Each structure stands twice: as structure tokens, then as C-alpha cells.
Image (cartoon, grey):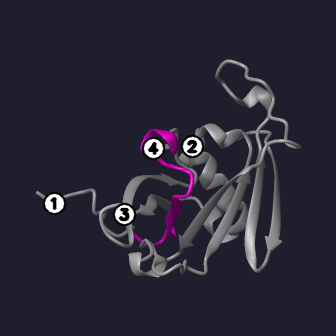
Amino acid sequence: MGGARRDIRERRGKMAVESRVTQEEIKKEPEKPIDREKTCPLLLRVFTTNNGRHHRMDEFSRGNVPSSELQIYTWCQLRMDATLKELTSLVKEVYPEARKKGTHFNFAIVFTDLKRPGYRVKEIGSTMSGRKGTDDSMTLQSQKFQIGDYLDIAITPPNRAPPPSSRMRPY
């Protein structure tokens, strides 16, 4: 996010990050600037762990959510074009221990299960501090993220291997 301006605020015991992306940083056709006085920002509710594993789905049940909530308020991502690398940068601003080179970030979308009560999780990709990766430019939109979904990020310190992904199957 290069020269993007960000504000971090403490709200009711939860961290909040505000992202402002300048027009030069949007590499698509120029769009009308968003009137922040008339447009409500998008709230991304992000939950993190530092043990390399995602939260259990029962932690999201009956109106409860895990306590490690990071709230990201953003206007320019109304198109859901936030990349995993941009989100990694925002998380690293709040959690200095995650800035270490080699720290692994595994992203998952947590969404309401329409067929039965509760939530489901879909792992969508990963990034690593200090290294470029194939998932860096993946967007939330490309993974069918919808307003109301949660983002769960399992952070693994560089001195520990990330747990095996449920997406990878040993053959």
C-alpha cells in the first residue's frame, strides 16, 4: 500500500485500523473519489491467532466472536479489492512481533452456513513477511468475500513451521 495513510485507533478494547489508499495507488482506471462525508466505510472484522492455527468455529457461535478482534475501516476497498499482502501490512502495524522476516500469515474467510446453524471456514491463501508469494496479490473479492463475513488470520512465528493446511492433502 506504499504511501497509503493509515490510522490505528483503540475502540472499546479492540484495535481499529483505518486505511486510506491514494488514487495513484489504485492501478485500475481512475474512479470518482469517494465522498467520505456521505459514504459509510466498510468494516472488516479480522480475528488473529499467533499459534499458527485458525480459530475453532464454535468460537463464532451464538453471537460470540473470539477476543482477538482487529477492526479495519476502509473506504477504497468497497470493491473488495484488498489484497492479502495489504492486509498483512495492516496486521503487522498492530502486532510488532509479526513483522519478523519469515512470519507466516494464513488467511481464511469465516462465513454463515446457510444450510445449517453456525459458521464455516474457507482457507484462501497465505503470505510471509519479507518474502514475495503467489498469494500476495489475491483479493478478497476473488475469493467471494461478502460484507458480513469475517477474516481469520493464523499467524505463525518464523521459528515454527506452520501447521499443515487442510487444503493440502498428503498423497
Q: Nearer the viewer, mark 1 or mark 3?
A: 3
Q: Earlier in the sequence, mark 4 or mark 1?
A: 4
Residues under numbered marks 3 and 4 in contact, where contact means CB atoms less than 8 Å apart: no
In the rendering, at what x and y percent does residue 19 appear? 76, 49
Circle on res. 113:
3
**Location of mark 1 (residue):** 170
- Queried whether the magenta region covers residue 160, the answer comes back as yes
Task: Assign a secondary structure to mark 1.
Answer: loop
Amino acid at circle 3? Asp
Residues under numbered marks 4 and 1 in contact, where contact means CB atoms less than 8 Å apart: no
Amino acid at circle 4? Asp
Q: Earlier in the sequence, mark 3 or mark 2?
A: 2
The residues bearing labels 4 and 1 have C-alpha atoms spaced at a distance of: 21 Å
Q: Write the residue at 72% across / 39% down.
A: 76
In the rendering, at what x and y percent does residue 139 appear? 52, 41
Q: Nearer the viewer, residue 4 or 117?
A: 117
Q: Nearer the viewer, mark 3 or mark 2?
A: 3
**Location of mark 4 (residue):** 135
Circle on res. 83:
2
Above or below, 47 against 59 in this view is above
Q: Earlier in the sequence, mark 1 or mark 2?
A: 2
Q: Quadrant of residue 65?
A: bottom right
Amino acid at circle 1? Pro
In the rendering, at what x and y percent does residue 160 appear? 43, 72
Residues under numbered marks 2 and 4 in contact, where contact means CB atoms less than 8 Å apart: no
Q: Write the residue at 10% across / 57% down.
A: 171
The residues bearing labels 1 and 2 have C-alpha atoms spaced at a distance of: 28 Å
Above or below, 57 against 43 in this view is below
Magenta stretch: give its range. Answer: 140-161
Above or below, 114 against 32 in this view is below
Q: Residues within 10 Å of mark 1 (few under 14, many from 20)?
A: few
The residues bearing labels 3 and 2 have C-alpha atoms spaced at a distance of: 24 Å
